[in-house]
Image (cartoon, helix red, strand yellow):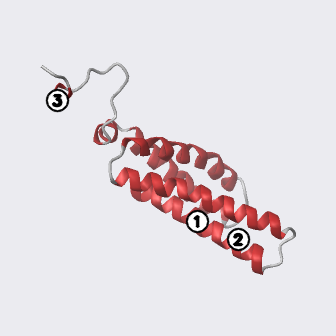
Amino acid sequence: MAGLNALEGTALVVGGIYMLVMGLLGRPDSPEQAEMGGLTVIALGLIPLFAARGLLLRRSWSRGPALITQIIALPVAWTLLRSHGVLIPAGIVLAAVALTSLYQLVRPATIEALGIRRPGAAPDADTTDA
């Protein structure tokens, strides 16, 4: 699960760097827009990377950013699937990764491993004073 988030984050950062370099060195229609788009994608790529690190360290806060990343990835995958050429396989891969990650993030075993209590659940006996 942490690996899938890291994979998505890395892909976003690499794509952002590519956009940024092409904005600086290439001949885009709008260099400013290409550069800002690259910086934005790099910043968005950092979110799943931080979430992946948190998941690896079993930090409960990391589940939220990881879930949001996967939910945002689904419409992107849908858009890629409705495109042409090489974007269709990219959409299939993104959809598979997002759905797999979502499933892993909502599993009871994951919730327990991250130390997240369900609403209305009694506190553990270890945490109460006798």
Q: Confirm or deny contact between disc 1 and disc 3 (CB under 8 A).
A: no
Marks 1 and 3, how far apart at CA? 42 Å
The label on residue 126 is 3
Residue at disc 3, secondary structure: helix
Residue at disc 2, secondary structure: helix
Q: Nearer the viewer, residue 73 or 13?
A: 13
Query: In the image, 90: left or right of 51?
Result: right
Q: Residues within 10 Å of mark 2 (few under 14, many from 20)?
A: many
Across and down, in percent, residue 33 comes to: 80, 63
Indicate which label's residue lies in the foreground, 1 or 3.
3
Across and down, in percent, residue 15 comes to: 63, 67
Quadrant of the rendering where the C terminus is positioned: top left
Q: Residue at x 33, y 29 (%)?
A: 117
Q: Confirm or deny contact between disc 2 and disc 1 (CB under 8 A).
A: no
Across and down, in percent, residue 41 comes to: 65, 60
Q: Nearer the viewer, residue 25 or 82?
A: 25
| Amino acid type at mark 2 | Leu
Q: Point out the residue furthest to the left here.
A: 130
Q: Point out the residue furthest to the front here.
A: 129
The label on residue 20 is 2
Residue 91 visible in rendering: no
| Amino acid type at mark 1 | Val
Q: Return the residue at label 1.
A: 13
- Give the mark nearest the N terminus, 1 or 3: 1
Query: In the image, 35: left or right of 110?
Result: right
Residue 96 visible in rendering: yes
| Amino acid type at mark 3 | Asp
- Give the mark nearest the N terminus, 2 or 1: 1
Q: Residue at x 70, y 76 (%)?
A: 21
- Residue 116, image quadrant: top left
Q: Residue at x 45, y 51 (%)?
A: 51
- Give the mark nearest the N terminus, 3 or 2: 2
